[in-house]
Image (cartoon, helix red, strand yellow):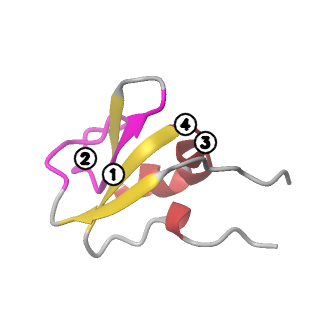
């Protein structure tokens, strides 16, 4: 496994994410701003499933308060 470098990623906890998941339409628990420009939102399932990819493409991540996102945990060694 290669280490993931995360240059200047800003993660903030917000009261709620008012979007729906771009993957399945469920209530979003995480939204992100891409380094290339656009924005995406994901439900808890999709946010955790794609955590490593999100870390690689996001400039800013907004996580709903109380949601335990896999991307916020240290990578296993």
User: How far across and down, in percent of the image, does residue 33 sit?
Assistant: 37, 37
Q: Is residue 27 magenta?
A: yes
29 inside magenta stretch: yes
Relative to 64, is 27 above or below?
above
The circle drawn on residue 57 is: 4
Residue 73, numbered circle: none
Determine contact: label 3, label 4, CB under 8 Å. yes
Badge 3 local density, few (<14 within 10 Å), some, or many (20+)? some
- Quick one: SS at disc 4? helix
Corner quadrant of residue 59: top left
Q: Are marks 2 and 3 in contact (CB under 8 Å)?
A: no
Q: Nearer the viewer, mark 2 or mark 3?
A: 3
User: For mark 1, what is the residue?
Assistant: 43
Q: Is most of the magenta stretch helix, strand or loop?
A: loop
Q: Position of residue 71 (x, y in %)?
A: 54, 61
Residue at image mark 2: 26
Q: Which residues are magenta?
A: 17-35
- Residue 53 versus residue 44 in the image, above or below: above
Task: Identify the residue at horizontal 29%, vertical 57% (top origin).
Answer: 29
In the picture of the structure, the residue carrying the numbered disc 3 is: 56
- Dots 3 and 1: beta carbons under 8 Å? no
Q: Residue at x 50, y 57 (%)?
A: 48
Secondary structure of the residue carrying tag 1 is loop
Q: CA gap, disc 3 to disc 4?
A: 4 Å
How far across and how far down the image is residue 52, in percent?
Answer: 62, 50
Q: Which quarter of the image is occupied by the N terminus?
A: bottom right
- Between 70 and 72, which is closer to the camera in this rendering? 72
Classify mark 2: helix, strand or loop: loop
Nearer-N-terminus badge (1/2): 2
Circle 4 or circle 2, nearest the eye: 4
Mark 3 and mark 1: span between their CA atoms? 18 Å
């Amino acid at each position: 496994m290669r280490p993931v470098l995360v240059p200047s990623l800003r993660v903030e906890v917000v009261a709620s994410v008012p979007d729906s998941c771009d993957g399945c339409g469920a209530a979003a628990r995480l939204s992100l701003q891409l380094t290339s420009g656009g924005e995406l939102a994901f439900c808890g399932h999709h946010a955790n499933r794609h955590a490593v990819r999100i870390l690689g493409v996001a400039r800013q991540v907004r996580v709903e308060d109380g949601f335990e996102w896999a991307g916020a945990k240290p990578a296993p060694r």
